[in-house]
Image: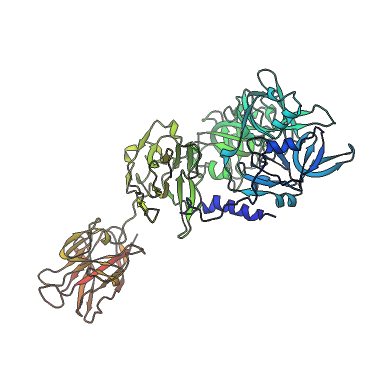
């Protein structure tokens, strides 16, 4: 066994977790690599082992190695125990006695198969890799399912899934229909194809893809009348979807079925999922949903399709069977969150013109659609896909599996991307094949969103990460903030931009204004990644007339390297947090010159020098001062009050808000001398409401002391430090350093 499960684990970990690493562009993990090198194309292999017989089996005795990229998926349940691959020359079917193959073999995954001592043959006309079986009634050998263990012992995974390698060939039904010669069968069996401009012959607005009791044949036809059987399993998750009316394009896998020796057989077509049917204008589709009055009609009962109506209420608390209008709360917020009611008219209050939709406990539908938590959805239009059935004694739509709701604007946003890109955010890839992803820096455990063109195809890359709809008008704060980081890798084309939009689809936005936040700057060398850069307060108040989206855009044309841009800690609508610490680090550079210095927040150091922590002593840098509060990389700055009576030093805070219950700071003396004395006053409106005096006659030089005392101060206040000049000298004396001032707010 070629360590199959190990490789699969690596793939999943790399894609979904190790992509969560700042080294994503230079992955530290081993990507699965096949041990054998292909030496024959699928087309050559099929031709070499072709027999005209309807059923046969052959053993490969030569060292032949084939490879291909997976083109099938059994995730929907429509393809059964089969894997299809293609290498661009041809496609081939592999029968495997295993379900849920999509978990191990994603579309675009390259696999390598050493064929020596394994088998190729036909089962009822379809050439495939399989296992020998004796068909007694026909007295013939045929190809049946490979045992799972055998398959896993022969297959080798190579690299990661690459959708660009999936070869979808445009064909017409007339290219193969009615043709049963070896050349045509070899060419089209097992091939992933797209057939454009066809219609489902049986589509009538109510007929579904398959009956519930058995696999069902439906038929597509082109404008010339050429027809093709479409095989739909009753186990497919789209079985109950209504066949689309009108012209569609279909993507799927071609197969061939024959039951007797030398019979002409039947060409068959397999959809991988409902998404393989593109277009169609019939009723019940996403683009043409049923109206609520149509859902209520008896002929649509048990149909699974799309419907659209306005949310007009919810079933009242305690009601188990709806018998009258009084059983419905025609308002929002509703008392409970387990149902919603839809009607064609937003002002409807007649339950007989409505449908009831259950929102099961713990479901995504309840989380997103209930009007108890989201009263803004009341009287808004909702598009929903589910089964039309009776519920609580009235018409209903049950088992809903998909929906389109209007975006409910949020008043605030705090997103750290710790686990994933949130479902409430929108990722839009305009061009290229790369999208925003969530990742984690392994050394710190910090999660963030990232985007790069690295290992991408089809530039230019234009990818957007878009916030939920922001209610700027009613938000408590109109300020947006975030952080960025970038690894430039010498890229000359990669750009990061931030926009305000009035649509979650940038191409549809009529308001699309580029903002001007502070963003990270690529580094020229090591480390590859820049430091995180704060955006600053981005004021959105000029858009306070309504609700908008913020779009983070990555754009890059073809480049030898691509930058990786990272976004984290996006906040909006949150009133600024009151400061609870000094910002001495924003004062000018450390200096031994006596003077007056001011921080960004307005802390004033008068008649002070500015010392700073460091790795080694070298006046005005001293190791005992250490790091700034909460940091392991930024050294603290320590205003140092002169103790001379002619130039007495002081440190005065700006007006601080929120009160204080405890005060802390560090202090010490960098210079020789045993005396250290200063006073700390807390003032309100110029009056001292709390005071402490530090008076130490035996100070240890270059030693950090800690101060922590409780107090009770409500409202606005200031903190003032004053040197008490214990030596009573006029010169440079009794210099007291203060740093890392912080406090607990009262509210």
Position of residue 685 relative to residue 350, above or below, is below
**Foreground residue among 431 and 526:** 526
Position of residue 379 relative to residue 410, above or below, is above
Apparent side of residue 141 relative to residue 128 in the rendered image (left or right):
right
Q: Quadrant of the C terminus?
A: bottom left
Q: Quadrant of the N terminus?
A: bottom right
In which quadrant of the rendered view does residue 230 lie? top right
**Foreground residue among 436 and 359:** 436
In which quadrant of the rendered view does residue 211 lie? top right
Measuring from the top left, give residue 150's x and y in whole percent. 74, 51
For the image shown, how many numbered marks are present on the structure? 0
Apparent side of residue 517 relative to residue 261 in the rendered image (left or right):
left
In which quadrant of the rendered view does residue 683 lie? bottom left
Residue depicted at x 10% and y 73%: 730
Residue found farthest to the bottom: 698
Measuring from the top left, give residue 565's x and y in whole percent. 42, 47
**Foreground residue among 224 and 447:** 224
User: Colour scheme used in the picture?
Assistant: rainbow
Measuring from the top left, give residue 341's x and y in whole percent. 57, 36
Measuring from the top left, give residue 208's x and y in whole percent. 69, 30
Mark yes or no: residue 35 visible. yes
Position of residue 228 relative to residue 458, above or below, is above
**Foreground residue among 280 and 142:** 142
Residue found farthest to the top: 224
Mark yes or no: residue 329 visible. no
């Amino acid at each position: 066994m070629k360590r199959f499960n190990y490789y699969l684990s690596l793939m999943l970990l790399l894609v979904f977790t190790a992509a969560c690493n700042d080294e994503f562009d230079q992955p530290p993990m081993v990507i699965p690599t096949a041990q054998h090198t292909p030496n024959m194309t699928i087309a050559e292999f099929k031709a070499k082992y072709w027999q005209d017989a309807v059923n046969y089996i052959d053993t490969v005795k030569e060292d032949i190695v084939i490879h291909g990229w997976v083109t099938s998926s059994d995730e929907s349940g429509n393809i059964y125990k089969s894997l299809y691959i293609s290498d661009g020359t041809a496609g081939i079917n592999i029968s495997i006695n295993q379900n849920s193959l999509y978990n191990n073999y994603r579309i675009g995954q390259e696999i390598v198969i050493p064929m020596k001592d394994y088998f190729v043959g036909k089962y009822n006309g379809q050439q495939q890799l399989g296992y020998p079986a004796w068909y007694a009634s026909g007295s013939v050998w045929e190809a049946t399912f490979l045992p799972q263990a055998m398959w896993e012992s022969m297959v080798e995974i190579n690299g990661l899934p690459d959708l660009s390698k999936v070869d979808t060939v445009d064909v017409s039904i007339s290219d193969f229909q009615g043709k049963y010669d070896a050349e045509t069968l070899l060419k089209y069996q097992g091939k992933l194809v797209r057939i454009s401009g066809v219609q489902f012959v049986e589509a009538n607005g109510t007929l579904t893809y398959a009956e519930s009791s058995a696999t069902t044949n439906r038929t597509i036809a082109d404008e010339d009348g050429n027809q093709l059987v479409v095989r739909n399993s009753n186990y497919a998750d789209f079985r109950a979807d209504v066949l689309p009316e009108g012209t569609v394009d279909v993507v799927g896998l071609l197969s061939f079925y024959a039951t007797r020796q030398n019979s002409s057989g039947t060409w068959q077509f397999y959809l991988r999922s409902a998404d393989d049917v593109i277009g169609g204008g019939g009723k019940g589709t996403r683009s043409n949903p049923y109206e609520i009055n149509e859902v209520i009609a008896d002929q649509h009962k048990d149909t699974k399709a799309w419907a659209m109506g306005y949310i007009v209420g919810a079933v009242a608390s305690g009601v188990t069977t709806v018998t009258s209008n009084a059983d419905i709360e025609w308002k929002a917020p509703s008392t409970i969150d387990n149902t919603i009611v839809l009607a064609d008219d937003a002002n409807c209050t007649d339950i007989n013109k409505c449908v009831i939709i259950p929102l099961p406990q713990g479901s995504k539908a309840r989380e997103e659609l209930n009007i108890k938590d989201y009263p803004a959805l009341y009287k808004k239009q909702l598009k929903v896909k589910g089964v039309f059935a009776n519920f609580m004694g009235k018409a209903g739509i049950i088992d809903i599996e998909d929906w389109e709701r209007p975006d409910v604007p949020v008043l605030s946003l705090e997103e750290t991307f710790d686990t994933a890109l949130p479902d409430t955010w929108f990722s839009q890839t305009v061009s290229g094949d790369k999208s925003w992803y969530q990742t984690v820096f392994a050394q710190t455990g910090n999660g963030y969103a990232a985007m790069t063109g690295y290992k991408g195809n089809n530039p230019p890359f234009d990818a957007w990460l878009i916030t939920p709809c922001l209610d700027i008008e009613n938000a408590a704060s109109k300020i947006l903030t975030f952080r960025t980081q970038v690894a430039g890798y010498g890229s000359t084309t990669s750009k990061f931009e931030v926009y305000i939009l009035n649509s979650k689809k940038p191409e549809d936005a009529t308001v699309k204004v580029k903002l001007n936040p502070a963003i990270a700057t690529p580094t020229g060398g090591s480390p590859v990644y820049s430091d995180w850069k704060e955006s600053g307060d981005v004021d959105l108040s000029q858009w306070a007339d309504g609700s908008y989206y913020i779009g983070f855009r990555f754009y890059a044309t073809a480049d030898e390297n691509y930058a990786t841009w990272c976004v984290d800690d996006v906040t909006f609508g949150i009133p600024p947090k009151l400061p609870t610490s000094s910002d001495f680090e924003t004062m000018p550079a450390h200096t031994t010159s006596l003077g007056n210095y001011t921080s960004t927040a307005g802390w004033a150091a008068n008649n002070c020098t500015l010392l700073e922590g460091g790795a080694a002593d070298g006046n005005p840098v001293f190791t005992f001062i250490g790091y700034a509060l909460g940091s392991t990389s930024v050294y603290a700055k320590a205003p140092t009050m002169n103790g001379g009576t002619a130039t007495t030093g002081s440190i005065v805070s700006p007006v601080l808000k929120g009160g204080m219950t405890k005060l802390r700071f560090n202090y010490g003396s960098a210079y020789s001398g045993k005396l250290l004395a200063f006073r700390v006053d807390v003032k309100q409106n110029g009056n001292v409401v709390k005071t402490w005096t530090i008076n130490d006659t035996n100070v240890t030089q270059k030693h950090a002391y800690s101060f922590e005392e409780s107090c009770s101060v409500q409202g606005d206040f200031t903190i003032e430090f004053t040197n008490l000049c214990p030596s009573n000298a006029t010169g440079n004396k009794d210099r007291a350093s203060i740093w890392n001032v912080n406090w607990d707010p009262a509210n």
